């Protein structure tokens, strides 16, 4: 009888969570689409290793905050299914963190891409 290694099980849970977020949250799909576009453009613009690292961290930063936001929204809905001001504040502040990260990614993208395009 074979047992699945606990690390593999953990990866399974992580991928299951990613699939659930992709299915539930259109914003994650939008961020991933824009990330793919940025990666393709970076490839054609011959980014150097430093630029690739900056791009990767910027993309990861936005996606991580979007996943945390999705988690927080699900937890708030579970704990407080009725509409409450505290629940609204928690969701709005979490969404604001994603917004700030997305705006920062536009600034970083401008610094990375514009000099190579113009």
Image (cartoon, rainbow, N blue to C red):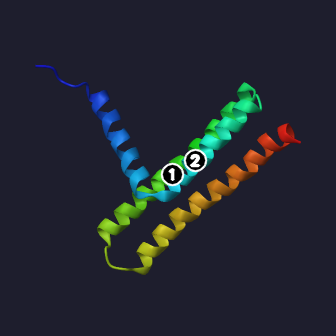
Marks 2 and 1: in contact by CB < 8 Å? yes
Element under disc 1: helix
Height in image: 111 above or below 6? below
Please tell me which residue lies in front, 64 or 40: 40
Left or right position of 63 against 12: right
14 horizontally vs 52: left or right? left
At horizontal 70% and vertical 31% (from top left) the residue drawn is 43
In the picture of the structure, the residue carrying the numbered disc 1 is 29
Residue 116 figure quarter: top right
Q: Residues within 10 Å of mark 1 (few under 14, many from 20)?
A: some
Q: To which quarter of the image does residue 102 belong?
A: bottom right
Q: Position of residue 10 (x, y in %)?
A: 31, 35
Residue 62 is situated, as x and y percent measured from the top left of the image, at 58, 49
| Image point (66%, 32%), residue name | 53
Residue that extends furthest to the left in the rendered view of this protein: 1
Q: Is residue 110 left or right of residue 53?
A: right
- Above or below residue 82? Residue 100 is above
**Foreground of the two, 25 or 1:** 25
**In-image side of 5 versus 24 (left or right):** left
Location of residue 44 in the rendering, given as x and y in whole percent from the top left corner: 74, 31
> Which residue was labeled with disc 2?
33
> Which mark, residue 118?
none
Measured in 3D between alpha carbons, the distance from the residue under mark 1 to the one under mark 2, in whole angstroms, is 6 Å
Identify whether 110 is placed above or below 53: below
Instruction: Say which quadrant the N terminus sits in.
Output: top left
Residue drawn 71% across and 38% down? 41
* Quarter in which the C terminus is drawn: top right
Which residue is farthest top? 1
Q: What element does badge 2 sit on?
A: helix
């Amino acid at each position: 009888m074979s047992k699945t290694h606990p690390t593999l099980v953990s990866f399974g849970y992580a991928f299951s969570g990613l699939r659930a977020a992709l299915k539930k949250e259109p914003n994650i799909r939008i961020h991933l689409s824009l990330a793919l576009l940025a990666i393709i453009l970076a490839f054609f613009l011959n980014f150097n290793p430093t630029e690739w690292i900056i791009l990767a961290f910027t993309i990861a930063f936005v996606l991580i905050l979007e996943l945390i936001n999705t988690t927080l929204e699900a937890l708030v809905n579970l704990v407080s299914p009725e509409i409450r001001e505290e629940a609204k504040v928690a969701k709005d502040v979490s969404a604001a963190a994603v917004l700030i990260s997305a705006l920062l990614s536009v600034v970083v993208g401008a610094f990375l891409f514009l000099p190579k395009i113009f």
